[in-house]
Image: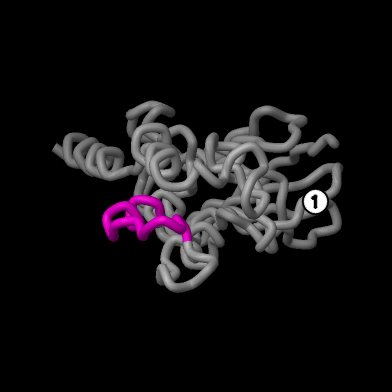
Amino acid sequence: MNKIFLFLLILTKIVSQIDYETQVQPLFDNNCTSCHNYGGSGGLDLSFYSGVMTNSNSGPAIVVGDHENSQLYIRITLPESNGQSMPPSGSMSSDEINIIAQWIDEGALQVLSNQLGNEIPNSFALDQNYPNPFNPTTNIQYSLLKESYVTVNIYDVVGKQIKTLVNRKQDMGNYSLQWNATNNYGEPISAGMYIYTIRAGKFHSSKKMVLLK
């Protein structure tokens, strides 16, 4: 009975997840890519995932896990009377804006975490990132045995915190993050070795990765 309950809990979480390819990219295609493509307006290309995850001229377009500080979210919620609002031809609906906000808060994934497999995790785990070495993006996967408050941080080799990828409570399940080699200010970082860590309750783990330029 407990296993059935846990499976239903995971299934509920999966069903509610936002899918980038079918839910988010079509919003950009319908509202934004007439201006924001091929390095167009604001230095932001919203015609494909890697372009969306690249910084705009105004700062980080997407701050993973934090829609309120993502430039993309800020711009689409500005009033139409503001010359910096997106899209310029009219506002997105509240439902469309909520989809983008939820997608950012869930980790701004290109691939849903349920595509990692629907099995119930039997332990806490942090996997080796892939690809590794990488340039400019890499994926980090981890598993939670139970609901936990989770922090995933990236540090340089002298222990300076470079980026916070996750800092919130998450349900039990399997997760995947993508990091685009930028710091907390959306600035590109230099090549070298970095350490990524996870804390989830009493579980703590860290691994090394190498950024090439």
Q: Quadrant of residue 136?
A: top right
- Is 92 included in the stretch rendered in magenta? yes
Q: Residue at x 80, y 53 (%)?
A: 156
**What is the x, y in percent for residue 61?**
58, 55
Q: How is the image coloured?
A: one colour
Residue furthest left as drawn? 1
Q: Quadrant of residue 52?
A: top right
- Of the pair 169 and 20, the residue shown nearer to us: 20
Q: Residue at x 60, y 42 (%)?
A: 45
Q: Which residues are magenta?
A: 86-100
Q: Residue at x 69, y 63 (%)?
A: 185
**What is the x, y in percent for residue 128?**
64, 33
Is residue 32 visible in this depiction of the protein? yes
- Is 148 included in the stretch rendered in magenta? no
The vertical placement of 13 against 79, above or below, is above
**What is the x, y in percent for residue 92?**
34, 56
Q: Residue at x 44, y 61 (%)?
A: 76
Q: Which residue is label 1 attached to?
A: 189
Label 1 sits on a secondary structure element that is loop
| Relative horizontal placement of residue 71, taking residue 160 as reference (left or right) | left
The vertical placement of 59 against 39, above or below, is below
Disc 1 residue type? Ile
- Of the pair 177 and 45, the residue shown nearer to us: 45
- Of the pair 101 and 171, the residue shown nearer to us: 101
| Relative horizontal placement of residue 168, taking residue 147 as reference (left or right) | right
Categorize mark 1 by other alpha carbons within 10 Å: few (<14), some (14-19), many (20+). some
The vertical placement of 85 against 146, above or below, is below
**What is the x, y in percent for residue 143?**
46, 40
- Of the pair 84 and 126, the residue shown nearer to us: 84
